[in-house]
Amino acid sequence: MIAVLGLVVGIVVGLVVHPVVPSGVEPYLPIAVVAALDAVFGGLRAMLDGIFDDKVFVVSFLSNVVVAALIVFLGDKLGVGSQLSTGVVVVLGIRIFSNAAAIRRHVFRA
């Protein structure tokens, strides 16, 4: 219940405050969101499998976001930022769809 309440409060604050993303961070935000979604789907899958650990989830969430952002940052510095961004999105997208398929199999027994 606390997580749902936190989600609702976060959405309301975001709608009321209208946060502005600094231009220096803009290239990393979509990658960070995809990395966070990967961690969320992985956590949901672990919960349904009965092996969820909140500490592992938090570390996975934060490390996914930081590593993905660092890869894109490194790509920007090397001049291949768009290629590395695409690679990160593809890899995390595959993981998200894999976790979504496992969740679907668990929920619908299909």
Image: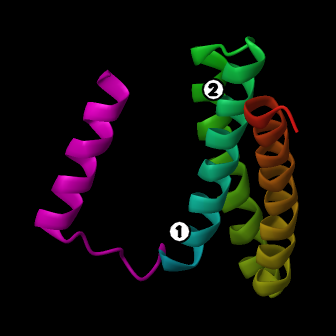
Seen at 72% across and 36% down, the residue is 42
Which residue lies under the disc numbered 2?
57
Seen at 64% across and 66% down, the residue is 31
Q: Percent position (x, y) of residue 89?
A: 78, 68
Q: Tell me the quadrant of the picture where the N terminus can be found.
A: top left
Comparing 85 with 44, the one in front is: 44
Q: Which mark is residue 29?
A: 1
Q: Is residue 27 above or below residue 36?
A: below
Question: On the image, which quarter does residue 82 sit in?
Answer: bottom right
The magenta stretch spans residue 2 = yes
Q: How many marks?
A: 2
Find the magenta span and give its range.
Answer: 1-25
Seen at 66% across and 30% down, the residue is 43
**Horizontal placement of 15 versus 70: left or right?**
left
Q: Amino acid at mark 1?
A: Leu
Q: Which mark is residue 42?
A: none
Comparing 26 with 4, the one in front is: 4
Q: Percent position (x, y) of residue 33?
A: 57, 60
Task: Give the SS element for disc 2.
Answer: helix
Could you classify mark 2 by the number of other residues whose Cα lies within 10 Å: few (under 14), some (14-19), or many (20 or more)? some
**Horizontal placement of 87 versus 35: left or right?**
right
Q: Percent position (x, y) of residue 15?
A: 19, 65
The CA span between labels 2 and 1 is 20 Å
